[in-house]
Image (cartoon, grey):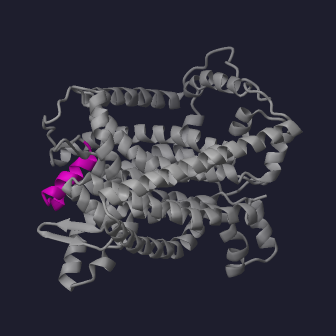
Amino acid sequence: MAQLPSLPARLPLPNRRDLIALPLVFGLIYLVAWAGGRMSAPYVIGQPLPISLDPTALPGYALYTVLRMAAALGLSLLFALVYATLAAKNRYAERILVPALDVLQSVPILGYLSITVAGFVALFPGSLWGVQMAVIFAVFTSQAWNMAFSLYHSLKTVPRDLSEAASTYQLSPWLRFWRLELPYAMPGLVWNTMMSVSGGWFFVVAAEAITVGGHQIMVPGVGSYIALAIQQRDLGAIGWAIVTMLGVILLYDWLFFRPVVAWADKFKFESSASGNAPESMVLDFIKRTRIMRLLAVVPGVFWQASLRLGARPKAFPGEEDARRARWLDLIFNLALALTVVGTLIEMWRIIPRDFGWDEVGHVFLLGGATALRVFVLVLLASVVWVPIGIWIGLRPRLAQRVQPLAQFLAAFPANLLFPLVVVVIVGFHLNVDVWVSPLMILGSQWYILFNVIGGAAALPSDLKEASRNLGLRGWLRFRRLLFPGVFQSYVTGAITASGGAWNASIVAEVVSWGSHTLVATGLGAYIAQATARGDVHHVVLGTGVMALFVITINRFVWHRLYQFAETHWRLD
C-alpha cells in the first residue's frame, strides 16, 4: 500500500525559483478572476456586444477564448474518465455507450448549438453566463468524444500480465484504475487531449458567433474576431488573428502540454528505461521549487488516502455469480430488442408522414456521396501520416519540436481558406464535387498524425532494442513491430478523423466568398442548406441519416479493426 506523504518538520525557506513562480501563479489567478468577472456581465438577448477588428483588442479576446477552451477541456476530461471507464468496465453499459458515442461524434456542432443555446440562455436570465456556457458546451462537443474513445480503447487493451498481477494482488477497482489502468492509458490520452484542444480551435469560430431567436451573438474572443473578419472580407484582420492563434498555441504548449508530455513519459509501458525521454524546462523548474512543492503535499495526502478506499474484489467468481450473470444477460438482451423494435415501428410510422420515402432515399444517396469522400480522404491521410507519425514518434526531441506546429495546423479554421478555394475552382472551372473535398479532411487528418505519434512514442524501448538485435530493418521492421505497435492508436485516430470529416462536410460542401457560393453533392450540403433555411425537420433527417452512416461504418469497419488489434497485436 502506498505511503502517505508527510509534511516537513520545519517550513522551508523559499528559494529563488519560488520568488519567480509564486508571483506568476498569483498573477495568473488574478487575471483569471478579472476575466471571469468581465465574462459574467449583465446581458439581454438582442443587446449588441461590440467586437473590434483593432489588433490591440486581440490579447484580451485571446484570454477569453483560452478560458472558455480551458473550461471545456476540464469538462471533457471529466466526461472521458467517467464515460470511458463505465463503457470499458461494464459490458451492459458498453453495448449502449459505445454506439451512443458514435452518434454523439457524428452529430454536427451546428446541431448542438441550435438545441443548447436557448436552454443555457434560459438557465442564466439577464447574464452573459448563458451564452458563455453555450459556447463552452459547443467546444466541449468538439473535444470530449475522441478523448473518451482514446481512453476506452486503452482501457480495453491493458496488457494481460499486468491485469493478472492486479487480480493476484486483489487490488480494489479504485486502486486498480489509478495505479494500473489510467497510467497505462495516459500517453495516448495526453496526445489525444492535445489534438482535442486543436479541434476546439477549429470549431470555436462557429461557437463564438451563434444565433439565438434570429439574433446573432458574437461573444468577445478570437473566434468571433475571425468570424467578423470573414464577414467584412478583411484579410489584414485575418492575418492578425492567425498570428495571435500561433502565439497562444506556442504559449500553452510551452506552459502546459510540454510539461504534461514529459510527466506522462514515466507511465510508458516498458521494462527498461528509455535514454531519450521528452523534457520540459517548466516541469524541471517547478520540481526545483520549495514552497510550490510544499503546497502540493496537502492534496497529495487526501489523494493517497483515497487510494485506500474500496472493497477488494472476490478472487474467483462462484457458480452463483455465473448463474446471475446469465439471467442478467437474458433480461438485458430482451429489453434491448424491445427498445430497438419499438424505435423501428415508430420510425416506420413517422418517416412516410413527415418526409416521404423518396426524400429519405434521396438523403441516403447524398450520404453515400459524402461517405465515399470520407473513405477516400481518410485512406489518403492514412497513407501520408502513418509513416510520418511513426518516424516522428520514435524521436521524442523531434516530436517536441513538431508538436506546436501540428497543433497550429490542426487548429487552423478551414473557412479561412474559402477565398483561395473559391478563386481556384471558379478561375480554373474545376469540379466542385472533387475540389472542395480536401476542406473536409483539413482539420481532422491531424487526429491520425497525433494518435500515431502518441502510439509510436509509447512503444516500449525493450521491444525496439530487441528488434534491432534481431536485425529487423526497413520494411520488415515496419511490418513486424512498428505498424502492429501503433495500430490500435491509428484506429483511434482514423475513427475520430472519419467522424471529424463527416462533421466538417457541413462546412466544406457549401463554400461561400463574396457573391460566389459553391455547393457540392452530399449530405453535408443538404444539412447546411436546411440549417440556413431554418428547416428543422430536414436538419433532423439529415443528421439522423449521417449518424446512421457513421454508426454502420464504425460497427462494420473500425470496431472490427479494434477487435483485430485487441486479439492479435496487444503489447503483452
Quadrant of the image occupied by residue 292: top right
| Majority secondary structure in the magenta region | helix
Magenta segment? 221-236
Residue 302 is left or right of residue 509, and the answer is right
Quadrant of the image occupied by residue 121: top left
Query: In the image, residue 186 lies at what x, y percent?
Result: 62, 47
What residue do we see at 70% from left, 57% from top? 275
Q: Is residue 76 visible?
A: yes
Queried whether the magenta region covers residue 70, the answer comes back as no
Is residue 202 or residue 323 the one in the foreground?
A: 323
Spot the residue most to the top: 9
Give the number of marks. Answer: 0
Q: Is residue 494 visible?
A: no
Queried whether the magenta region covers residue 225, the answer comes back as yes
Query: In the image, residue 67 lies at what x, y percent?
Result: 36, 37
Query: In the image, residue 202 lies at what x, y percent?
Result: 35, 55
Residue 441 against residue 34 in the figure, above or below = below
Query: In the image, residue 416 lies at what x, y percent?
Result: 26, 62
What residue do we see at 38% from left, 74% from top? 369
Residue 462 is left or right of residue 77, and the answer is right
What residue do we see at 59% from left, 58% from top? 454
Residue 489 against residue 245 in the figure, above or below = below
Residue 248 against residue 294 in the figure, above or below = below
